[in-house]
Structure formats: structure tokens, C-alpha cells
Image (cartoon, rainbow, N blue to C red):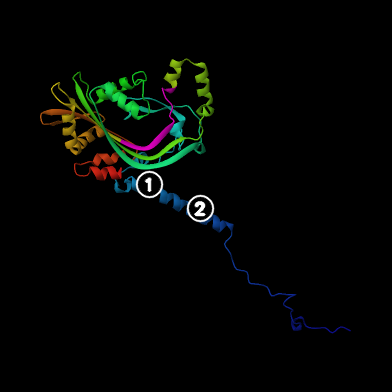
């Protein structure tokens, strides 16, 4: 006959009946979602603060909301973007460009993985002298890899338009162009068959249209390689008489180059060429800056040329 035992008197066997563990309250999925959301907000706010601080927006409390949106808000990328963009377009002669060529219309369909990228972090300065649009056109076309046919391709006409933008005159002129090229990377195609990457519309145009139509739509060239970075150009023009030597004029400009650069920044602000008189001679100047923070050059003074160039 079984003996009735009080349940409380029966010893517990830990292996068979473990005591109930005290459960700790843990943060569920909802908590983690809130934390992730807050982290995203902080990261976006930090990026915006860094971007607008770099542009000096926090030092301008007088900005209205519209001013902030126009001057400080990052603009979304439109159209072609990335390392392949400069190689995906054709190039054409452009009198407003420092080297008389600029990107034109999309010709190829590239992806970033189709492109070789080689870092070339270097700054190079060069000075070119010319006494005619023909000599300037030949020098510039050679510098971008076109050794012949500067007149045929329109470089000479573009050089004449470029000179008229600085000083429109029928007198004999001396022209000095100083370039500072801040190189970052050089890009080129991995494939040796560019035609395999033509867009459908470009292929149809090349196969069906006349040469004149092709040139009008896509320009004269497509690039084999492109160096990305920034370029600064200062053009100085003055009259040269038959009795004068171009080397003497070049020496006078080089001896006071920083002063010429300071006078030339006025053309960067207004777009039109500026003038400068020195030693009974009038000089006509125009400055162009492409790439980087071009507004840095507006603070140019005679004693901070190297500093501004370094910041740019």
C-alpha cells in the first residue's frame, strides 16, 4: 500500500526537474529598430554638417532657407557620373575651354569596371607664348595629342575666338598663357575595341548619317585617355610692335607674374577680360579655373599665390 507523501517533502532531482531560471528582460526587435533609425539620423546629420561647414555655410547666419538650399545643399548627380563619364562622351572644339576642347555628347556606354584608373597626383605649370592664332592653335592641339590638322579640325578658328574674348583688336599681338594643371588620376579603357561599347543611337548615326552630320552631332574626337583634376589658366595679351622682341615682353610679364595674377582675378568674378597698365603698356588679362574650389582664387593677393594654389 503506497504511502502518501507530502509533495513538499519529496526532494527534487536537479537533473530531472531543474529550477526555473529567472528570465531577464531583453530588448526586442522594436528597440533595435529604434536604435538603427537614430544612428541613421545621426550619420546623415553629421555628413550634412561636415558638407555645409566645408562650404562655410555655418559662418553665414544671414542665409535664408532658400539661400541654404541653393548654396549649401548637395545637388544630386544628373546624367553621366563616375570614373567612366569622361571616356563615355565625344569631345569637340570649344573656344571657351583652356585647351580648346570640352566634353560633348554621349558616344559610349561604359561601366566603372571597364575603366583603368592610374593615380597621378602631381601639379604641373607651363607657359606658352604665341604671336598668332595659328601658332597658339598648333601648340594647344599638340598638347592634347593632335599633331596635325589643327586648322582642319577647327583649332585655329577656336584660338582666334579665344583671343578675341581677351582682346579684340586688329593689331599685332603677343599672347602668354600660363597653365597650372593639378592632376589626380588618368583613366583609360581596358578594351582595345571602343566600337564594342557604342550606344545604340551612336552606332546607328555612324552607320547611316553623312560625315558632316556625324561631326555636328558628336564633335570631332573621342578620347583614348583622360586626366582628371583641375586647371588654372591666366592669359595675358598686349600689343607687339615690329621693333619689339617677344622674349623681352615675356620677361616683363614673368618678372611681375603675381601682380598680373591678382589683376586677372577680376575677370574670374565678372567673366569679361580685365586690363592692367604698367610701364606705358596696356595688358589684357583673363583668368579661367576649372575643377576644385574655384572660388578660392577670389581671395588671391600678391603675397598668397602659393597658399591659394595649395588650397585649390
Q: Residues within 10 Å of mark 2 (few under 14, many from 20)?
A: few
Q: Is residue 73 visible?
A: no
Q: Earlier in the sequence, mark 2 or mark 1?
A: 2
Within-10-Å neighbours for mark 1: few <14, some 14–19, many 20+: some
**Relative height, residue 95 to residue 7 (above, below):** above
Q: Which residues are magenta?
A: 218-231
**Given the current orientation, which residue lies at the most extreme left position?**
280
Front residue of 262/68: it is 262
**Image position of 27 (left or right of 310):** right
| Left or right position of 21 against 152 | right
Give SS at disc 2.
helix
Q: Kindly state the secondary structure of the residue where label 1 is placed.
A: helix
Q: Which residue is mark 2?
A: 37
Q: Nearer the viewer, mark 2 or mark 1?
A: 1
Identify the image quadrant of the N terminus.
bottom right
User: Which numbered tag is attached to residue 220?
Assistant: none
Which residue is identified by label 1?
A: 51
Mark 2 touches mark 1? (CB < 8 Å) = no
Return the x and y of residue 11 as percentages of the image width and height: 75, 82
Q: Quick check: 207 above or below 184?
A: above
Q: Position of residue 155 (x, y in %)?
A: 33, 22
201 to 70, vertically: above or below: above
Residue 287, image quadrant: top left
Who's the residue at 36% across and 22% down the image? 148
Name which quarter of the figure residue 187 lies in: top left
User: Depth check: 81 or 227 in front?
Assistant: 227
| Residue 263 is covered by the magenta coloring | no
What distance separates the C-alpha of mark 2 from that of mark 1?
A: 21 Å
Percent of width and height locating residue 312: 30, 42
Q: Residue furthest right?
A: 1
- Answer with left or right where residue 201 lies relative to residue 99: right
Left or right: where 123 falls relative to 210: left
Amino acid at each position: 500500500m503506497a504511502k502518501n507523501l507530502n509533495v513538499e517533502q519529496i526532494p527534487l532531482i536537479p537533473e530531472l526537474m531543474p529550477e526555473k531560471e529567472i528570465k531577464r528582460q531583453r530588448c526586442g526587435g522594436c528597440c533595435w529598430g529604434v536604435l538603427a533609425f537614430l544612428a541613421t539620423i545621426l550619420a546623415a546629420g553629421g555628413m550634412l554638417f561636415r558638407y555645409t561647414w566645408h562650404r562655410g555655410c555655418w559662418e553665414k547666419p544671414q542665409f535664408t532657407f532658400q539661400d541654404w538650399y541653393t548654396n549649401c545643399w548637395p545637388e544630386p548627380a544628373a546624367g553621366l557620373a563616375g570614373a567612366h563619364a569622361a571616356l563615355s562622351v565625344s569631345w569637340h572644339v570649344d573656344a571657351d575651354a583652356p585647351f580648346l576642347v570640352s566634353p560633348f555628347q554621349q558616344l559610349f556606354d561604359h561601366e566603372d569596371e571597364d575603366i583603368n584608373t592610374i593615380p597621378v597626383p602631381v601639379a604641373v605649370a607651363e607657359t606658352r607664348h604665341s604671336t598668332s592664332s595659328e601658332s597658339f592653335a598648333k601648340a594647344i592641339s599638340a598638347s592634347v595629342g593632335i599633331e596635325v590638322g589643327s586648322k582642319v579640325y577647327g583649332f585655329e578658328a577656336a584660338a582666334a575666338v579665344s583671343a578675341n574674348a581677351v582682346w579684340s583688336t586688329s593689331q599685332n599681338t603677343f599672347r602668354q598663357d600660363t597653365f597650372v594643371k593639378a592632376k589626380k588620376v588618368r583613366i583609360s579603357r581596358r578594351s582595345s575595341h571602343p566600337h564594342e561599347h557604342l550606344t545604340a543611337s551612336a552606332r546607328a548615326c555612324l552607320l547611316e548619317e553623312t560625315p558632316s552630320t556625324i561631326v555636328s552631332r558628336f564633335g570631332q574626337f573621342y578620347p583614348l585617355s583622360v586626366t582628371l583634376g583641375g586647371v588654372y589658366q591666366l592669359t595675358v595679351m598686349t600689343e607687339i610692335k615690329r621693333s619689339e622682341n617677344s622674349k623681352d615682353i615675356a620677361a616683363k610679364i614673368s618678372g611681375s607674374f603675381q601682380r598680373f595674377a591678382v589683376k586677372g582675378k577680376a575677370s574670374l568674378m565678372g567673366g569679361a577680360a580685365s586690363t592692367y597698365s604698367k610701364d606705358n603698356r596696356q595688358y589684357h588679362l583673363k583668368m579661367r579655373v576649372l575643377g576644385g574650389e574655384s572660388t578660392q582664387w577670389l581671395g588671391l593677393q600678391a603675397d598668397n599665390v602659393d597658399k591659394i594654389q595649395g588650397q585649390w
